[in-house]
Image: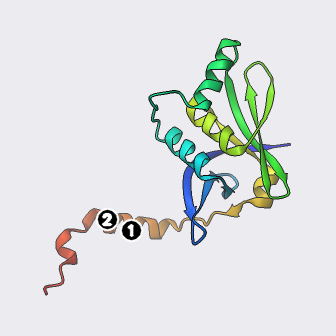
């Protein structure tokens, strides 16, 4: 099966349910993949994405330390499929081993270890949302506006 590297956009909150969503973005093909996660997992993802180091190691750092002690390291993670509404993921180590994981844990580990995140192409096409293509002319006009706007442009004179 083929897979595509994705960018970890981050954690967003779906309203009105107030449910955290891990948002991944692929460039080719241009898709977003939303994965609903729990609040604790969303917190761990946010900490890892910001590159923060808590005073005591979290479970993700512990797992990376264990891999290192066994002379292995995390090579990449892949979101592999779905079982009903549950997404599945795998950790891949540099010694050829594959370990089943929850996507939230897999992505948190990837962010902590600074390794790539992939999604199976078929899963991306089936469960992803097509990303709208940017209109280059509109983007250029908006950049021009930002380059030339000043605070005085917003004064109402009241």
Residue 80 higher or lower than 134, as above or below: above
Q: Cβ–Cβ below 8 Å for labels 1 and 2?
A: yes
Relative horizontal placement of residue 123, taking residue 154 as reference (left or right): right
Label 2: element kind:
helix
Q: Give the residue at mark 1.
A: 142
The answer to whether residue 95 is left or right of residue 15 is right
Whole-percent x, y for residue 51 in the image: 47, 36
Which disc, if any, is residue 146?
2
Residue 41 has which mark? none
Q: Position of residue 82 (x, y in %)?
A: 82, 52
Q: Nearer the viewer, residue 141 or 83?
A: 83
Pick whichever, 48 or 26, lies toward us: 48
Q: Is residue 112 visible?
A: yes
Residue for point 59% across, 47% down: 40
Label count reads 2
Residue at coordinates 80% horizontally, 60% vertically from top-left? 126
* Quadrant in the rendering for residue 44: top right
Residue 64 left/right relative to 120: left
Q: Is residue 16 above or below residue 113?
A: below
| 125 left or right, relative to 153 | right
**Whether residue 114 can be seen here:** no
Q: Percent position (x, y) of residue 67?
A: 68, 19
Residue 45 placement: quadrant: top right
Which quadrant is the C terminus positioned in? bottom left
Residue sitting at 64 percent across and 36 percent down?
Answer: 116
User: What secondary structure is found at the residue carrying circle 1?
Assistant: helix
Q: Quadrant of the N terminus?
A: top right
Q: Residues within 10 Å of mark 2 (few under 14, many from 20)?
A: few
């Amino acid at each position: 099966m083929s897979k595509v590297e994705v960018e970890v956009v981050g954690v967003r909150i779906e309203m009105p349910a107030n449910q955290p969503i891990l948002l991944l973005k692929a460039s080719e093909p241009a898709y977003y993949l939303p994965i609903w996660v729990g609040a604790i997992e969303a917190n761990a993802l946010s900490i890892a994405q910001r590159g923060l180091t808590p005073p005591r190691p979290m479970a993700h750092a512990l797992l990376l330390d264990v891999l290192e002690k066994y002379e292995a390291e995390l090579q990449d993670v892949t979101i592999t499929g779905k079982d009903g509404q549950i997404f599945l993921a795998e950790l891949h180590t540099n010694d050829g081993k594959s370990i089943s994981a929850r996507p939230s844990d897999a992505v948190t580990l990837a962010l902590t270890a600074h390794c790539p995140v992939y999604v199976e192409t078929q899963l991306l096409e089936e469960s992803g949302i097509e990303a709208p293509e940017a209109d280059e002319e509109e983007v250029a006009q908006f950049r021009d506006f930002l380059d030339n706007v000043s605070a005085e442009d917003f004064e109402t004179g009241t």
